[in-house]
Amino acid sequence: MVNLSWIYGHAKTTWAHPTSPIQLTTKSGDEVSLSEFCKATVPECHLNPLLFNGHLQTCYTAIKEEGPALTYKRKTFESDDVNYPGQFTVDFVARESSPKDDTLPKRTTYYSEKELEQIGSLDSKPMIIALHGLSGGSHELYLRHAIAPLLTPEAGWEGCVINARGCAMSKLTTDRLFNARASWDVRQLVKWLRVKFPNRQLYGIGFSLGATILTNYVAEEGASCELKAAVVISSPWNLEVSNIVLQSTWVGLNLYCRVLGGSVLKLFEIHSEQILKNPLIDEKKVRSIRFLYEFDRYVQGPTWGYPTEGAYYRDASSVDALNNVRIPLLAINAQDDPIACNEAIPYEEFKLNPYAVLCATSMGGHLGWFQIGGKRWFAQAATDFLKRFETDVDTAATATKNPALNSNAVTLGKGPRFDPLRRRLHDPAIEP
């Protein structure tokens, strides 16, 4: 029998998780598995039937609407990592409007010196940290749709968005942009927030490339991660596989690779004077770029020390890092996503990590999931999960009953072992 559910916009949902996920302890003293908690929280996926495939859903994201009117105050940070010097910016959700600043995105202004001195609170409000997608920023529609429901007076959350270096009209002060492995700025921000807001529960949400960065960060922190839970949406997971699949079709190469390449080339043009200070950059080759993978070959590779774009993709992918996630993580992907393709989703890894749950829908595209009326299903799915986690889950009791694995590696006997952070098989007997 032919399945015609797409005609009505009904997307099929596939779940991937271990048979024995961690148990969440609720504030009422009950216990529920992470997988059952996610399934009970995430709503059924009903989309606009006129946008019946991943291409239509993805391309519809180009429709510009006003969206939720979030106001931001920007703070500039100086990196405290000697290996990755420079500046990065964080936009904090503000409750009042400010005078227009043409040097920043709409509804965004800098904190004044007086305001910076007053940052900090002992309140116990939950706080969301958001990471945008490739070449985006705090102004992105998909991001505002997802976090705005948390930031209403009724919901009572606070929030901030970390802008990748060079994005969202921020100044680039080194000869390198962001990359998918760039977790150090997130780490610095989280440490700073923990000092300034010691009583707040911190949560993370990442979109596309931001989902890769967030997953890598959470995995690198392991059991010490300060975030209570995280949601990653439209993650490309295995960047090399996604790149190969994109290039395998005319539409993938000439539409998506070209559009994505154009977006990062705009960043290069804005910051070209700074980036071209790197002697390894061949300006002539950069000027010939048409596609995203060429940008990664001629700009990202040389500035970050990768010999090829493939080496960059393999190193920066979050597919192996997923094995070391030690906080509750909900991943949302669409199986018809033409950019973060289904072939790159690590279904088997999700079946092994008790801290992670994958919700994969049959339709939705890349950062799409548009419903009738223009709302986005993923925004409700993410915020429903986060809100309920904050109101229902006793994180201290949950952590006590689900101690994270002591080792960052999966050990196979006494011989070689696979370390998800090194992404290599190595033998402790012959390595220092």
Image (cartoon, helix red, strand yellow):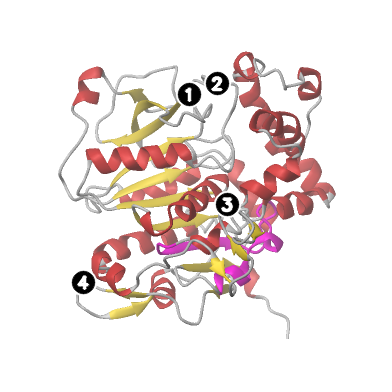
Q: Amino acid at mark 4?
A: Lys
Label 1 secondary element:
loop
Which one is closest to the eye, mark 1 or mark 4?
A: 1
Q: Earlier in the sequence, mark 3 or mark 4?
A: 4
The quadrant the N terminus occupies is bottom right
Q: Residue at x 57, y 54 (%)?
A: 234
Residue 27 bears which disc, if any? 4
- Location of residue 389 by image quarter: bottom left
Residue 350 is one of the magenta-drawn residues: yes
Q: Which residues are magenta?
A: 326-351
Name the disc covering residue 86, or none: 1
Residue 401: % across, % down: 30, 74
The percent coordinates of residue 429 (x first, y second) are: 61, 62
Asked if the residue at tag 2 contacts the one at tag 4, i.e. Cβ–Cβ closer than 8 Å, the answer is no
Q: Are marks 1 and 2 in contact (CB under 8 Å)?
A: yes
Query: Does label 1 or label 4 sit earlier along the sequence?
Result: 4
Q: Is residue 178 left or right of residue 277?
A: left
| Residue projecting furthest to the left | 122
Can residue 232 be seen in this snapshot? yes
Amino acid at circle 1: Gly
Q: Which of the two discs, 1 and 3, sits closer to the camera? A: 3
For disc 3, the marked residue is 432
Residue 30, percent across and down? 25, 80
Calculate the distance from the C-alpha at mark 2 to the C-alpha at mark 3.
Answer: 33 Å
Q: Which mark is residue 174?
A: 2
Q: As shown in the figure, which amino acid type bears the numbered disc 3?
A: Pro
